[in-house]
Image: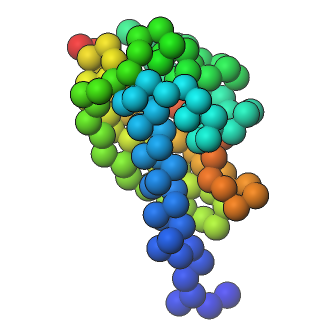
Amino acid sequence: MNVNQRTVSANEYKNVTEAATKYVEALRTGNVDMLSDVFHKDCVTYGTVNGELMGGASNPTADFIQNYGKSPEIIFHIDILDITPTTAVVRIVMEKDAVGSDCNDYLSFIKLDKRWAVISKIFHQFEK
């Protein structure tokens, strides 16, 4: 293996960032349908809300949008923590969601059929 060989192009970083941004945009606009473009159908999600574990094989993000609506004041920052040709781990720091909470989401992406999709999500909601 050539240690000086690039394995992931800058364009792939852009593609992963765009997919993560689309997720936040779905939250901002309250667009549940947009989530299906980002989340794999077999995605699992777990996290803590008010100190309690929640999640599972369904999409709690869609439930959140349906229950609380859009998050027009959401502020976010995206970091790609690691990336390979077919996987990526992303941290999204968010403030001011639909219920006024702040949280960190950790999204695991997988590239299938030339498309990046969230295969798992773990999150922490901070106390208000």
In the visual, does 78 lie left or right of 88?
left
Residue 89 vs residue 60, the one in the foreground: 60
Q: Is residue 36 visible?
A: yes
Q: Is residue 82 above or below residue 102?
A: below
Residue 14 vs residue 30, the one in the foreground: 30
Q: Is residue 102 visible?
A: no
Q: Is residue 58 above or below residue 42?
A: above
Q: In the image, what residue occupies the spot 51% across and 56% down?
A: 16
Q: Is residue 96 above or below residue 49?
A: below
Tell me where residue 34 appears, x and y as whole percent: 55, 35
In the visual, does 98 lie left or right of 112?
left
Quadrant of the image containing the N terminus: bottom right
Occupied quadrant, residue 46? top right
Tell me where residue 80 appears, x and y as whole percent: 44, 55
Residue 49 vs residue 61, the one in the foreground: 61
Q: In the image, what residue occupies the spot 66% across and 56% down?
A: 115
Quadrant of the image containing the C terminus: top left
